[in-house]
Image (spheres, rainbow, N blue to C red):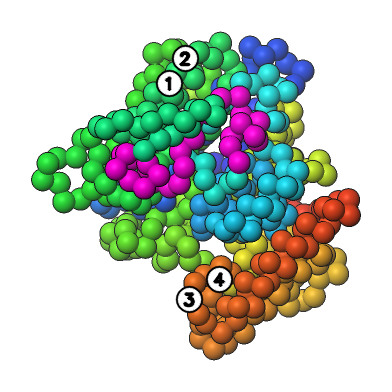
Amino acid sequence: MKLPIALSTAVFACLTSLLTAAEPTAGKPNIIFILADDLGIANVSAYGADNFKTPNVDALARTGIRLDRTFSCPNCGPSRAAIMTGRYGFHTGMTGNDKESQKVIETGGETMIPNILKPAGYVTGAVGKWSQVPLTPGDWGFDEYLMIQGSGKYWNTQDNGDAYTVNGKKVPLLDGEYLPDKMHDFAVDFITRHKGGPFFLYYPMSHVHNDILRTPDSATDSKDFFTDNVVYMDKLVGKLMAELDRLKLRDNTIIYFVGDNGVTPGQSERSTIGGKRISGSKGTLLEGASLVPAIVSWPGRIAAGTTSTAHGVSRDRRAAPAPTGRANALTRIARGRCRGGGGHSAASSGRAIGQELAARIAGDASQRGVQVAAGATARTAAVGIPADAAAIGALVGMRAARAAAKRGRICAGGCTVKAPGDTAIRSGRTAAAIGITQRRAAGRTEPSAPAAASPAALPAR
């Protein structure tokens, strides 16, 4: 069943008003947010993947809604920061997987999901990858956490893979122990101890980020560890759902299954739907980098087998407000507020990538009814970036990227390839960070995001 555009746009924004702060805690559903790493839509059979089978993820789609046009930032750090804060990278400073971005978001007074849900009565837990975002989950408000250092950690033979952190304490990963299984055990223990609810569990998985290594289920003669990893990821999703069923929590638990960005370049050729691969892969500004699987399941609340082609972006499913009080999806759920949203992910990382991309964003923004911020010039306002000090660096970077595009070389901010404009783009990103820091030091409020049209007024896509 296709969900009407106006309704599907608001699915993340207001699943129900059951989570109002005024209601008894017992009336609020649990929330589990599963974030797969480097998993594109062409790696999930519910989306028609040719070469991969994911029956447990598919089962979530059959019992809920499959969102077909959800976009993320094209890299891990910016995507996860947007998930946790509900804010664009040019506001938070998290525009890349670099230490400069980490410094800005660390000192910026951002509010993340747990600090919004805890006053509404939720116990909060995080289990899995937490590396590009600085500090620890506990520093950002999570009550309990298991944190792994870096991406794609599975066995203790890997660099930085010999230990993980549980609530601030280092725990050795022993020989023969598989880290994703330890993460699963932590998740099961968390939901079992807090089955009286409500709880929020953020579950950023190791799978299927590089290194692509054997799994405990890999055959001794396996020559396809990537498929083995997709299968094991799906198995862990199924095991977690089985635990919810065992605890009789499934009907009162909202499950989000989302990818943080598209598939890695090394696996993009085989990641096809209907015999065709999606253009681009992780780290690019093409669709294959940002079009991600997004499934929400809540039996009895979301109609089973629903699909939607309405556009959604990384910020749509976030819980934390801006320092100025703006709120996003999970915040509005917790407070019982329902509001559909527009917005676009193409500019959410704060990177501007050349004339062609800017033109595409401008066309899409026009169709979606996003209003250009007052004072921005026609050339730089196409991406909807406010013309203030915090965005100056991003605009400088965009202009440099446009110059590079004219020379036939488009280079994203932070890339290592030497191309015309590359140095200027790096300088632009630094300027953006400085601009944000200066605004905060001066006590100035962040500018409001461009206004969005009512969902009902948006054209069918």
Image position, residue 194 (x, y; %)? 54, 14
Q: Quadrant of residue 162?
A: top left
Q: Earlier in the sequence, mark 3 or mark 4?
A: 4
Question: Marks 2 and 1: in contact by CB < 8 Å?
Answer: yes
Residue 94 or 254: which is nearer the viewer?
94
Q: Is residue 139 magenta?
A: yes
For the residues marked 3 and 1, what is the alpha-carbon distance in whole angstroms?
44 Å
Residue identified by numbered label 4: 412
Q: Amino acid at mark 1?
A: Val
The nearer-to-camera label among 3 and 1 is: 3
Q: Amino acid at mark 2?
A: Thr
Nearest to the eye among marks 3 and 4: give it: 3
On the image, which quarter does residue 328 sit in?
top right
Distance Cα–Cα, label 3 vs label 4? 9 Å
**Residue named by callout 2:** 192
Q: Give how far across and how far down residue 395 sits, in percent.
A: 71, 72
Separation (CA) of disc 3 from disc 2: 48 Å
Q: Say how many tags the image has.
A: 4
Q: Position of residue 31 (x, y in %)?
A: 56, 27
Quickly name the residue at label 3.
417
Q: Is residue 243 above or below residue 310?
A: above
Q: Which mark is residue 188?
A: 1
Tell me the tag on residue 177: none
In the rendered image, residue 437, in percent from the top left (x then y), is placed at 78, 57
The quadrant the C terminus occupies is bottom right
Callout 2 secondary element: helix
Which stretch is magenta? 135-161
